[in-house]
Amino acid sequence: MVKLTDDSIMLVSPSGETSVFDPERLQSRIIQSFLAAGVSESYLADDISLAVEFSLRKSRRKEKIFTLSEINNSVVQILKDTGFPETAAIYMRHNACSRLTVDPDFNTVRKLLQKNMAVSPELLDELAGKVVSAAQHLNIKSAAPELFVELAKHYETEEFAAEDIELVSLDSWEQDNHWLVSVKTIEQELPVSARALIDAGVLRLIGVSRMFPAIRIFFMINAFCRFHGLNGPLTEMVLIPYLFAAGKAIDSCIMTAESLAEKRNELPIFLTIPDMSSFAAQMLDASWPEVEKNCREMVTPLCNSLSRPLFKLKLT
């Protein structure tokens, strides 16, 4: 049985089955489509999956429930908007994305929205009515289902993936123009204390992407312990002052990246600790994933050292 957290994102399949949203699985599907289209840059798939996850978590829906088709249509739209129509076509062929043409009568539109948007019956009726009215006003007799779904999302109070993601359309996509701020530029502006942790393999930064501007930092906790000469087994009380120091270094990376990006809005922050499971075994003498909750609590001092909250903390 899957134990859900309060912020779990649920997906509804066309058959009505529900499952927990898995960003890694989504990223894998996007990577497969990129490779089939002859694009080998896997970081693009990472950008898109992060953008989708960000928009899901930022949705103002009372319950974070979305249909699989809703997710896939969002991926396809992002691929098209960022200059990858071939990849979008391949993704559509292998995932649940409708390409039929339908008439905008109320019952048809309502069924279409019911399949593609996980909203209440009352809101479903309201959105269907607005979409039909808009189609009549624009003299649309028949159109692709995506058009009506996108109209409904526009009218929905908590519209999906609307204003939280800033997408960049490019005529051509090259390695050099992928980054809004390169990792080299960020590292050059960091204080000595933060650069020392990067040189020691404790911190690893990712540049700020143009496709999905965000701040991504990897914190290697085993290397961090070696850097400070810590040996296991460790207790939380021993780690706390060191984690506060790590948080200050990470915060300097965040502030530097955001300053260089010169964005109007705060960038979402993703912090990954990719070796937490091995740290638990080697330094805490504990079993993973049974101890994951305790590990999350243990790194609270680090997170509290940051000047603003993380969008996502990932432990693996």
Image (tube, grey):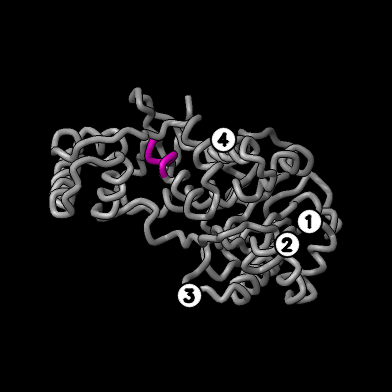
Q: Secondary structure at mark 4?
A: helix
Q: Horizontal and vertical percent for residue 181?
A: 65, 69
Q: Main secondary structure of the magenta part?
A: helix
Which residue occupies 68% across, 59% down?
206
Q: Secondary structure at mark 3?
A: loop
Q: Earlier in the sequence, mark 1 or mark 2?
A: 1
Q: Which mark is residue 29?
A: 4
Which residue occupies 64% across, 61% down?
178
Badge 1 vs badge 4, beta-carbon distance below 8 Å: no
Which of these two is toward me, 55 or 273?
Answer: 55
Which of these two is toward me, 313 or 166?
Answer: 166
Residues in magenta? 68-73
Q: CA distance from mark 1 to mark 4?
A: 33 Å
Q: Earlier in the sequence, mark 3 or mark 1?
A: 1
Q: Horizontal and vertical percent for residue 185?
A: 73, 72
List the residue tagged with mark 3: 264
Circle 1 crowding by C-alpha within 10 Å: few under 14, some 14–19, many from 20 = some
The mark lying in front, picked from 2 and 3, is: 3
Please tell me in which quadrant of the rendered image residue 219 appears: bottom right
Badge 1 vs badge 2, beta-carbon distance below 8 Å: yes
